[in-house]
Image (tube, rainbow, N blue to C red):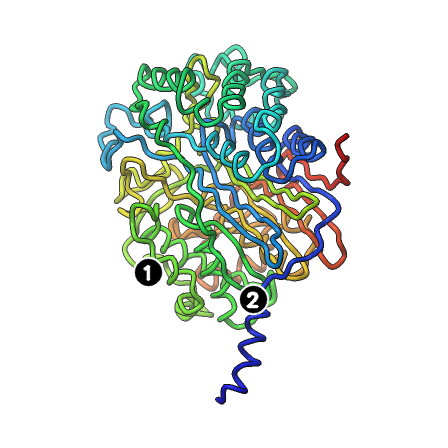
Amino acid sequence: MSMLVRLPILLALLLSLTVHAAPAPDQQAVASAHPVATAAGHLILDQGGNAFDAAIAVAATLAVVEPYGSGIGGGGFFLLRQPGDNTPRYRFIDARETAPLAAHRDMYLDQANEPQRVINGPLAAGIPGTPAALVHLAENYGVLPLAQSLAPAIAAAEDGFAVGESYRTLVGFRLAAMQADAETARIFLQNDQAPASGSLIRQPELADTLRALATQGHDGFYRGPVAERLVSGVQAAGGIWQPTDLENYRVIEREPIRFDSRGFEVISAPPPSAGGIALAGILQGLEQLPAATPGSVQWTHQLVELMRRTYRDRAVLLGDSDFIEVPTARLVSAEYARQLAAGVNPEQATPSTELGPPQPFQEGTNTTHFSLIDRQGNAVAATLSINLPFGAAFTVPGTGVLLNNEMDDFAADPSGKNSYALAGSEANAIAPGKRPLSSMTPTMLENDGQLAVLGTPGGSRIISMVLLGTLQAMDARPVTEWVSRPRFHHQYLPDHIQVEDSAFDSRQQAALQALGHSIRPVGRDYGDMQALLWDKRRGELSAASDPRGEGEASVQHPIKPD
């Protein structure tokens, strides 16, 4: 082919892969898992803050009003979009917890006398990252003082929030562990039981800790009186934190995973998240398979087979890229996706054991997500977690800080399983200062016509939920359908499709079983997706909160500050 012929083709290709700047929306949108947090985000935007200031307010408020899903005793990921002069700029803030410096690979292997210590109590807790992320956002991306952005959360902690049904349900899962810790029981239970619906939960000690963070920044949490109380409280209860663990904690700015699929650029989470890599394999792999109608048996079969393969890669290859070599470029490439697709039998499910030796492990489901955008086009997708409901069920006295139990997201036994039945390996083994592998997948899709921002809690099922929402967005479905569509999931092991009750009708189930798939009903709805869509051509924003949860999504014309 001559150069004269190749140049127009190359130019067309470059143009197809470039997202050009568009006029900013004249509205703002916030979608979060709790109405109080959504209101906090709008309040800060109305006070002249940008999306990053609002993200601080929403994250900190969720830490107060949704203690079963996130908290300043946990961590998470923030995917940021800034409009730029010509093309948008994306950054990924890794605020994942780290293993304490006294942690080691085999610290949980001898559990004969204390089988719950990997999930209950301070030995289960990694070093929190959320407070550092809030400071980092304020210092590097926000326009308001940190104290102003934290004010709604401080007020919520002081004034209290009303207990909802999600709170009561999740207390039921963790009641014994919460009863075992006097401080957790005092704050979050009433008479050692789940509080009545509508009861107020007040957290004055947490308000004081947030004030220290607001006035002193990073040192307000990681050094000084708060840090001293955290370390002494953890050690007194049998934990292994040291002052150096807190002093050394820093968030890491990473380049997000970026790839193209069906006319969109997909921007998602890099390691230590498995999400962006899995989305790249599945979405690009799907393009290599015969076209199938969305929702059909063949389409479902294709997705499940690609899920199976990418989740095996998660188990064998992925971990903290600061500690192990993750072949990210290869795993995200279209060529690798072609290899994944080439192994899919269109007429038969592949037993997971045929893909190689099993590598079992698990991941917490109680997480939270929010998506927001301001009128300048800055956007944030953030997924935050403390792992299991109410984390380690251990609150450090005098701080109000409920600790995570994210150490369970490591392969505590690299040859065994964790509490969510996910497969793991040496790549995700415990090491001092290491960040555990995660499925949290805050994601954006963008082209010249639209920007989609989405994410969800759900442990190992996060990736498949974000995948299904992404496909809805690519098919130009309304944002309400992304968050509400029935869901299904396969994670390599255990070797069955997990389905919501309404995901497949009896004919579809029978056809999938005829292909060799085993189907396991979930028994109840799962996930709590928060999403928004900016239609650039129409200049319209829309947002939706998952009907399975108690959240709220709203689009508003901002109130200009005086």
Q: Which mark is residue 355?
A: 1
**431 left or right of 480?**
left
Is 264 drawn above or below residue 410 in the view shown?
A: below
Residue 49's image quarter?
Answer: top right
In this rendered view, identify the residue nearer to me: 426 or 86.
86
Residue 328's image quarter?
Answer: bottom left
Label 2: which secondary element: loop
In this rendered view, identify the residue nearer to me: 272 or 341.
272
Residue 516's image quarter?
Answer: bottom left
Is 4 drawn above or below residue 202 in the view shown?
A: below
Is 551 drawn above or below residue 541 in the view shown?
A: above
- Crowding at dot 2, Cα within 10 Å, few <14 / some 14-19 / many 20+, comes out as some
Quarter of the picture holding the C terminus: top right
Q: Residue 460: horizontal and vertical position, in percent?
A: 45, 45
Residue that badge 2 annotates: 17
Q: Residue at x 32, y 25 (%)?
A: 123
How many numbered marks, from 0 up? 2
Q: Amino acid at mark 1?
A: Leu
Q: Which mark is residue 344?
A: none
In this rendered view, identify the residue nearer to me: 295 or 425.
425
Q: Residue 87: horizontal and vertical position, in percent?
A: 59, 58
Q: Residue 109: horizontal and vertical position, in percent?
A: 24, 34
* Marks 2/1: CA–CA distance: 34 Å
**390 left or right of 237?**
right
- Crowding at dot 1, Cα within 10 Å, few <14 / some 14-19 / many 20+, comes out as few
Q: Amino acid at mark 2?
A: Leu
Of circles 2 and 1, which is in front? 2
